[in-house]
Image (cartoon, helix red, strand yellow):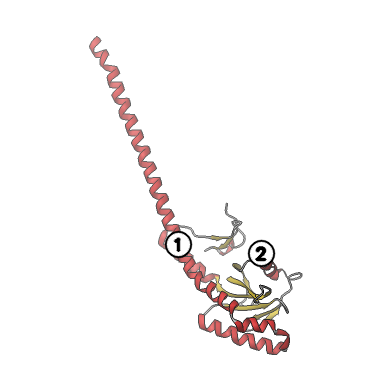
Amino acid sequence: MNKKKSTYPIFIVIIAGFVLSAFVSILSLRSLAHENTKEINTMLTYRIYQEITGNLEEPVTVSRSMAANTLVIDFLKNEDSYTEDEAVAYMQEYLSRIRDMYGYDAVNVISDGSRRYYTNVGLNKVIDVENDAHDIWYKNFIDANKKYYLNVDTDEVNHGQWTVFVDVRIEDDDGSLLGVCSVGVKMMNMRALFISYEYDYDVTVKMVDGTGLVQVDTDESNIENLYLD
């Protein structure tokens, strides 16, 4: 009887050791699975980021090339020497060539001197940052003092469609502002790209600005309405 009792602590220790070992194994497997998931997610995020960047690389390059084009710079420096009709015709021809060459949905130049909004279909309007809420983007961009940035906005020229614009400063040799040029890609094209990512990778993809405001989303109602932490 005493001998049987003496074996109880041994069994208890063995069982406790087995339970502890199983518990540690489970935790280790969970930790390993979590680390693998994080690694996969990181790789997936990087891949999607690279693909998005690749899709935006050309519009950025084209906009920056426009801003450095001596024809555009000389035109803006000497805009006063043209009549309005001559100026509009000159810029429309140039912007139409850019649009036809690359197939963008919008190609624009805004003169800082006259505030004329030139497009590939003619003169859109004279922008008024004080009284037209739709033109506040111009002031925000100039005040930000950035060489270029991506701006999501509705395109007045194309029936108010959501468009991703690449805006670039046009400057003279002294760095003085002459205007802004931009090319635009319809949001539906970016959304189609995001939808393909969500279908292929079973993830949700959104593009946000520095404040967390959604700029591109497969759900149009979230654009410039939803903030992410």
Residue found farthest to the right: 131
- The residue shown at (49%, 66%) is 53
- The residue shown at (47%, 68%) is 54
Which is nearer the N-term, disc 1 or disc 2? Answer: 1
Residue 138: x, y in percent?
A: 68, 70
Residue 15: x, y in percent?
A: 30, 25
- On the picture, is 15 further left or further right than 169? left
User: Of residues 160 and 59, which is closer to you in this image?
Assistant: 59
Residue found farthest to the top: 2
Element under disc 2: helix
Looking at the picture, which amino acid does disc 2 mark? Ala
Q: Are marks 1 and 2 in contact (CB under 8 Å)?
A: no
- On the picture, is 111 further left or further right than 36? right
Give the quadrant of residue 220. bottom right
User: Of residues 204 and 114, which is closer to you in this image?
Assistant: 114
Give the quadrant of residue 198. bottom left
Which numbered circle lies on residue 48? 1
Residue 205: x, y in percent?
A: 49, 60
Looking at the picture, which amino acid does disc 1 mark? Ile
Say whether residue 208 is visible.
Answer: yes
Count neighbours of disc 1 (C-alpha within 10 A) and say few if under 14, some if 14 to 19, many if 20 or more: some
Structural distance between the alpha carbons of marks 1 and 2: 28 Å
Q: Which residue is identified by label 2? A: 144
Image quarter (top left, top right, bottom left or bottom right) of the N terminus? top left
In front: mark 1 or mark 2?
2
Count neighbours of disc 2 (C-alpha within 10 A) and say few if under 14, some if 14 to 19, many if 20 or more: few
